[in-house]
Amino acid sequence: MATSYAGRLDPRHAPRLWWLAALCWVEALAVGAYLYAAPERVESLRYLFYPFVWITVGAAAVLWTDPPRASGRARLAAGGVAVAYFVTLASLAGLVSVDFAALLGGSHGHVATARHPTGWQFSLAAPGWGPRVGYAGEVVSGTFVPYRVAGYLALAYLVYAAVLDAAKSALSGALGLVSCVGCTFPLVGGLVAGAAGGTGVVSALQALSVDISTLVFVVAAALLAFGPSLAERARR
């Protein structure tokens, strides 16, 4: 997919490094304060490390990416694709769920609400894992986990830029977007995990679920942010 919007050393990127450095400093202060205030609540150092990776890598990829210029119609279409992509990732990760039986007027939703309380929920957690805000409704339920939401928003923005670039090159660009590994990698990983849910394989990998999802996220962000420029250099 021929792209010129990301992955290049550009003088305009230099000031953005200060924003990234400031973000890292704030994250380090938050982690340090949490370790000082509640060291007994830290399950492991990787428990604190992974949100730092998601937020920092996502911010770096977004700051590195400059979407190409496009018409208002193209931006609107790209925005629609990005929103759908974010909702899909959030659904696969369990951040958003919809009870279609209740939505269609069935009784399943009323049975569920009899067992689980509805309404807003709030809980504190380690930096990046919290603060968590959840909403449980009869039809729609959602949970706000800061590092997950930040990471998926970053991927959605990168997909937005990729769609705009694909719109410039018509059919060939559209085909390139469909075959974009960075776009599909998180989706395929989530679908595979969902299809295998409840099996012994998933039970065995449950302890490594955050490790695997973090690896998938980093690879996807790298492919979306730097893959186009590397492919362009390879063609030269």
Image (cartoon, rainbow, N blue to C red):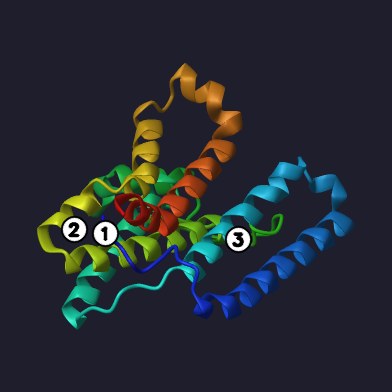
Q: Which mark is residue 144?
A: none
Q: Secondary structure at mark 2?
A: helix
| Percent coordinates x, y for residue 236 in the rendering | 31, 54
Q: In the rendered image of this protein, does residue 75 appear above or below residue 103?
A: below
Using the numbered discs, state the Cα–Cα distance from disc 3 to disc 2 in whole angstroms. Answer: 29 Å
Name the residue nearer the viewer: 165 or 43: 165
Seen at 64% across and 58% down, the residue is 128
| Percent coordinates x, y for residue 125 in the rendering | 69, 55
Using the numbered discs, state the Cα–Cα distance from disc 1 to disc 2 in whole angstroms. Answer: 7 Å
Q: In the rendered image of this protein, does residue 120 appear above or below residue 41?
A: below
| Percent coordinates x, y for residue 66 in the rendering | 40, 73
Crowdedness of circle 1 by 10 Å Cα count: few (<14), some, many (20+)? some
Q: Secondary structure at mark 1?
A: loop
Quadrant including the N terminus: bottom left
| Percent coordinates x, y for residue 175 in the rendering | 17, 51
Seen at 63% across and 70% down, the residue is 20
Q: Earlier in the sequence, mark 1 or mark 3?
A: 1
Q: In the rendered image of this protein, does residue 130 appear above or below residue 17?
A: above
Identify residue type, mark 2: Gly
Residue under label 2, please give it. 173
Identify residue type, mark 1: Ala
Q: Disc 1, disc 2: CB below 8 Å?
A: yes
Using the numbered discs, state the Cα–Cα distance from disc 1 to disc 3 in whole angstroms. Answer: 26 Å
Q: Which mark is residue 56?
A: 3
Q: Secondary structure at mark 3?
A: helix
Residue under label 1, please give it. 2
Seen at 39% across and 39% down, the residue is 190
Q: Mark 1 or 2, which is nearer the eye? A: 1
Answer yes or no: is residue 105 visible. no
